[in-house]
Amino acid sequence: MEQETLVYPLANNTVLQDKYTILNVLNAGGFGITYLALDNPHSRYVVIKECMPDAYAFRDMETGFVHPRDEQAAVNFAQSISNSRQEASVLAQLNHPGIVQVFDMFDANGTCYYVMENIQGQTLFEYGAETPTRQVVRDIWAKIISSPSRTPLGIGGFKPTIQAHR
């Protein structure tokens, strides 16, 4: 029997690290949840990505803590956390107008989070790429790489794992 995968995000107005206030969910998928949040000390909106692989973990709705589903899932969940930390670390080292800046990384609630700049722009769905063709993916990457600023296609919740099938 297949595992039921339900994503339970953090509640609006949850405060993380005594400085980030969750405002709402931007996107939720199989590996994580992205939130719009307020960075209170800097008075700016940010995006927070939470490592929440629903196949391997679940949230205790009373405490907000994320737990592995079972012993085997614990191994996979730990690897997901490691991968998320590595992703954040790599992004934090990059400086390009087509790539979001990572401001902060931290562990809380039994998982990890990273905080990125909030860029206004089109999502992939708004761009018309619900089922991206190979050419659409090439066009998107060309815009990202050649963009002199962050505004033409500030892709919110973009997942670089999107694949175009022949």
Image (cartoon, helix red, strand yellow):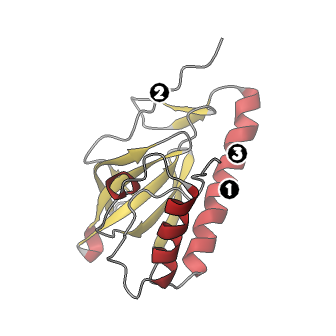
Instruction: Kindly identify which residue carries mark 3.
Output: 78
Mark before the other along the chain sequence, 3 or 1: 3
Please, is residue 138 above or below residue 92 in the view? above
Under circle 1, the secondary element is helix
Q: Position of residue 56 (x, y in %)?
A: 63, 33
Q: Residues within 10 Å of mark 1 (few under 14, many from 20)?
A: few
In the image, is residue 43 above or below residue 7? below
Circle 1 is placed at which residue position? 83
Going from N to C along the chain, the mark reached first, 2 or 1, is: 2
- Name the outermost residue toward the bottom: 148
Compare residues 161 and 93 and report the one nearer the observer.
Answer: 161
Q: Which corner quadrant holds the N terminus?
A: top right
Quadrant of the rendered image containing residue 122: bottom left
Q: How many marks?
A: 3
Q: Residues within 10 Å of mark 2 (few under 14, many from 20)?
A: few
Q: Taking 65 as reference, is 125 left or right? A: left
Q: Is residue 50 above or below residue 91?
A: above
Q: Which residue is mark 2?
A: 6
Q: Which sits in the foreground, 119 or 82? A: 119
Q: Residue at x 44, y 65 (%)?
A: 115
As shown in the figure, which amino acid type bears the numbered disc 1?
Answer: Asn
Res 67 quadrant in image: top right
